Image (cartoon, helix red, strand yellow):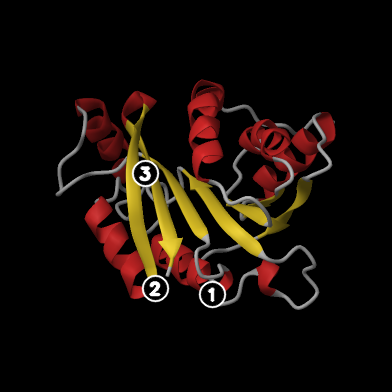
């Protein structure tokens, strides 16, 4: 049985994301992808960023199964099986003493903090602060508001749809995300506009 999921947006955005990752990724260590979704990003990115290792993760069981089957379909020797990871927990699974692929020198997260309650952003920043070394990097990709304003009418409509699913969902103000980062000893370095009204944000552990 093939449990792979397919996300059409992944194929559209994967090349611009990879180009940016290549500019910003550290030279060694392990990249932790939080909320790997279907797994399509992981199988595309990992072979292109060797010798870095790419650790997949998910919270949703069906998505964990999808990542597992994508890795079987397109294996790479630096691409690691997914781990169960809930960012709101005070200790992540990869913080366990028996996790052997440390140091985690970068964290990549796409399209999570707007499709989940604000607590996921709080947990993401707290966890990044715990596990990243000084100079370690956190990458966030997705739609964002600036000074409370949407960057496109389509994003406004998207947020209305998100809130119809759950009032706690919504496109986040980048100023609020930066503030949460600062609380955890993480600074915002740069924002890069991406296709389809998204942004790629680079943060760094102080």
Where residue 75 sits in the image (x, y, percent)?
82, 35
Q: Which mark is residue 165?
A: 3
Element type at mark 3? helix
How far, Cα to Cα, is label 2 from label 1? Answer: 10 Å
Residue labelled with disc 2: 185
Image point 35% across, 63% down: which residue?
187
Residue 145: give x, y in percent of width and height: 23, 44
* Mark 3 or 1, nearer chain start: 1
Location of residue 69 in the rendering, given as x and y in whole percent from the top left corner: 79, 36
Q: Earlier in the sequence, mark 2 or mark 1?
A: 1
Asked if the residue under mark 1 is in contact with the one under mark 3, i.e. CB atoms within 8 Å, the reply is no
Q: Compared to 70, does 83 lie above or below?
A: below
**Left or right: 118 with respect to 154?**
right
- Tag 2 and tag 3, C-beta contact below 8 Å: no
Name the residue at 55% across, 33% down: 18
Q: CA distance from mark 2 to mark 3?
A: 33 Å
**Could you tell me how far apart the alpha carbons at marks 3 and 1 are, in whole angstroms?**
32 Å
Of the numbered discs 2 and 3, the one sitting upstream in the chain is: 3
- Report the residue marked by disc 1: 130
Task: Say if residue 118 shows up in the picture.
Answer: no
- Residue 53, relative to residue 96: is it above or below? above
Between 182 and 92, the one nearer to me in the picture: 182
Say left or right for 167 vs 85. left
| Residue 77, visible in the rendered structure | yes
Q: Quadrant of the C terminus?
A: bottom left
């Amino acid at each position: 049985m093939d449990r792979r999921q397919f996300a059409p947006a992944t194929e559209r955005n994967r090349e611009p994301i990879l180009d940016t990752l290549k500019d910003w990724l550290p030279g060694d260590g392990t990249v932790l992808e939080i909320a790997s979704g279907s797994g399509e990003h992981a199988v595309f990115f990992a072979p292109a960023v060797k010798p870095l290792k790419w650790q997949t993760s998910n919270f949703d069981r069906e998505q964990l199964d999808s990542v597992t089957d994508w890795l079987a379909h397109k294996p790479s020797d630096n691409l690691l099986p997914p781990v169960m990871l809930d960012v709101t927990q005070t200790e992540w699974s990869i913080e366990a003493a028996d996790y052997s692929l440390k140091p985690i020198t970068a964290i990549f997260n796409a399209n999570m903090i707007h499709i989940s309650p604000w607590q996921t952003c709080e947990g993401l920043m707290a966890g990044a602060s715990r596990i990243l070394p000084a100079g370690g990097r956190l990458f966030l990709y997705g739609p964002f508001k600036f000074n409370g304003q949407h960057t496109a009418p389509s994003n406004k409509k998207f947020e209305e749809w998100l809130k119809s699913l759950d009032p706690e969902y919504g496109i986040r103000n980048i100023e609020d995300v930066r503030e949460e980062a600062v609380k955890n000893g993480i600074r915002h370095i740069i924002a890069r506009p991406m296709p389809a009204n998204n942004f790629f944000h680079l943060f760094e552990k102080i």
